[in-house]
Amino acid sequence: MSYVCPYAQRAWITRNYKGLQEKIKLVPMNMADKPGWYKEVYPNNQVPSLEHNKRVIGESLDLIKYIDSNFDGPKLTITDDPERQRFAEELLGYSDAFNRAFLDALRSEGAMTTEAVAALDKIDSALLKFDDGPFFLGQLNLVDIAYAPFIEGFQIFFAGMKNCDITQGRVHIQKFIEEMNKIDACTQTKQDPQVLLALTKKKFGI
């Protein structure tokens, strides 16, 4: 896995939160120079992936669901509330569009695009739906783990590349980040913001 990849961070947080450090071992990998054996094991040649029970599971959203369903530890999926289940699937399904909106905005001329603002407003409103906790479904779940690496990453990138605070005026997102940063399973996966910013600038040719 790549320690600086937000997709891999999803799986890393899930593993940590469920206490699976001894059962799921991390294999560090340079994204720019993946070893030849990796493509043989996982032809998609992307991270993260997990080899378990003689099969390889990839795609970060599929993988975090798999880890939650197939390993011991605190459950991160709600199974006894149909409304929250539906909302979780809606948000997980939206996550790629959220990420695309922000990547496009980073490439744009201005500080922020209409699409990125709408994406932030949607997420800020989503955090209001259930009031029994600071997370998307109230209590910590896979939706939070899916979004946290990207929200915090984009916060770093927009501050460093656009001089823009994407959380300004969005108190629910601010609270979400604050609460995620109280969870050891999350903070254990954090990397130096300046390193992440430098890698992103290089990727964007800045």
Image (spheres, helix red, strand yellow):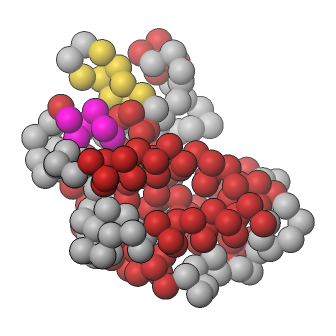
Question: Looking at the picture, does residue 69 appear above or below residue 57?
Answer: below
- How far across and down, in percent of the image, does residue 34 sit? 54, 29
The C terminus appears in which quarter of the rendering? bottom right
Give, as a single range, the part of the protein colored magenta.
Answer: 64-69
Residue drawn at (20%, 17%) of the image: 53
Q: Quadrant of the N terminus?
A: top left
Q: Is residue 177 visible?
A: no
Query: Which residue is pictured at 54% across the width and 48% down the height?
Result: 94
Residue at position x 71%, y 80% in the image: 164
The number of discs equals 0
Residue 109 on image: x %, y %: 89, 66
Q: Nearer the viewer, residue 32 or 151?
A: 151
Q: Nearer the viewer, residue 161 or 35?
A: 161
Residue 164 vertical placement versus 192 (above, below): below
Residue 28 visible at all: yes
Q: Position of residue 71 (x, y in %)?
A: 15, 36
- Dominant SS in magenta: helix
Q: Residue furthest left?
A: 72
* Residue 107 to residue 14: above or below: below
> On the picture, is 6 further left or further right than 84?
right
Q: Position of residue 48 (x, y in %)?
A: 43, 36
Residue at the front extreme? 83
Determine if the magenta segment contains residue 65. yes
Q: Residue at x 58, y 45 (%)?
A: 96
